[in-house]
Amino acid sequence: MQKCPRLAWLEYHHRQESSLPFYNMEDSFSSLWTRAYGLQDTPRGQRGDSFRILDSLAPGESARFIRIVYRDLRITIPWIRKLEDGWEAIWPMFTARESEAWVMKLARLAAAANGIDIRRQEAVFLNRSYIRQGSLDTGKLFLKSDCLENRKHHLTSSIEDLQADLDVDPDRLIDEACSLFSGPCPKAVNSRHCALGKRCRHYESCFRTDLRPGDDTIFLRTLPGRFSLPEGSMADLDPAGLENYPTAFGQYQAARHNPWIDREGLRQWMQDAVHPYSYLDFEWDTFAVPPYRGMKPADVLCFQFSLHTETEEGLDHASFFGWGDCRRAFIQRLLETVPKEGTIFVYNMEGAEALRLRQLARQFPEYAEPLQQIWERMKDLSKPFENGLYYNLRMKGRFSLKQVVTLFTDDPVYSSLAIHDGLQAVRAYREYETADPGTRERIMEELDRYCQMDTYAEYLVLKGLEKVMEE
């Protein structure tokens, strides 16, 4: 509600099925921390039973999932322990961010209104330094602290100190929420929250991006103060200082003369490329808890790759798909098929493939050198677009491979595929384990076609850039 009243209203009135969980987890998070701290036999709160459970506890004893109601606000404290002079609330979470102090204080105030005096607070969170060896060691998987992490994941300020600076008024917030939900849907307001990390799922419907012209200022990227700009054409902006923001500068130029092509900049970007050209793409899943030896919390497991290589005869293709702990087989197949020389084009490599290879090199040091030789030959195909060397108003502020490839081909590259985005690929991979043999074969074929299309799209994009450089 504080971030975006419209988002709160939409989520309240139009509740949707939960999207695919970001983390793949074999066991629930609550079962893991319950086991780690020996809480399996502690009482668990049920509706209307929480206060009876609290009354039955002696100092030092714990209970889980205690439900507290204050007016229209319902809060569950995952783990609460009786002290001699009050209570301790312990909050298990994947990452102990400083922003969680706000929620903890709101719960503390609601508890106080019910006569529950929370004197101490701690967080339980995943130990990022833990490296799995044999079986999962839940005792080492978690850390417990009265401090929370800053943006660099360093434990800095205590929960108490953070809460001392927070102004949280439950009555005012409840009144505002009730008023919001009983009223009409608020107007959409473009802000950094709309596309922070990834676009809100309501973004297109809120701003009707399908009906807006490509030069609309709502599609601007990287320019400070862009959210306060009036609606209109980017061509009407004051160009002074735009050169310091290459993406926004390219968008501004495209609004004046579409498309914007910095041919000299593209040539400089391509000058160190060496034949034969290859095109590489990985698919992976993210595990909150390391499932295999050598993995850390929040590590990813690459289960598939596609590789296209230009030859005199045309395009050669190689691929891999694996299940379970397929990391070593993935590496070996990759080293067998990637050419020993030439540039390897990857889309958004630093946030994806190069990062994955560095992780594999850490987990399998015997392959570190050849893997490093691969990532050092990679060239990020997204940079010409993100750095403002090429911009077409049809992009509408989107720089994904699936958006960019449509600029260089009239073929509906992805539309005919059963799997046509990364989330669907991960969903299919997670379904594979419990699928029957026939369904497994179908999933493998669909995943192969999707991943293969990504590297073919990379090929089409590079050929398109080479063409505009020659024009």
Image (tube, rainbow, N blue to C red):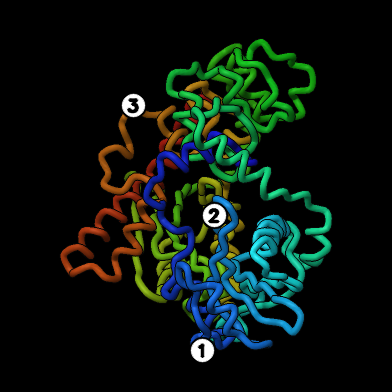
Label 1 sits on what residue type? Gly
- For the image shown, how many numbered marks are present on the structure? 3
Residue located at (51% from left, 51% from top):
344
| Residue 131, above or below 357 | below
| Residue 36, above or below 90 | below
Give the numbered dot on residue 177: none
| Residue 245, above or below 157 | above
Is any part of residue 367 visible from this angle?
no
Classify residue 39 by image quadrant. bottom right
Left or right, residue 243 beside residue 324: right
Residue that numbered label 2 is attached to: 352
Return the disc, 3 or 1, that comes first in the chain's sequence: 1
Label 3 sits on what residue type? Asp
Left or right, residue 438 beside residue 394: left
Residue located at (37% from left, 50% from top):
17
Asked if the residue at tag 3 contacts the one at tag 2, i.e. Cβ–Cβ closer than 8 Å, the answer is no
Q: Secondary structure at mark 3?
A: loop
Asked if the residue at tag 1 contacts the one at tag 3, i.e. Cβ–Cβ closer than 8 Å, the answer is no
Residue that numbered label 3 is attached to: 410
Left or right, residue 338 beside residue 387: left
Disc 3 to disc 1, C-alpha distance = 51 Å
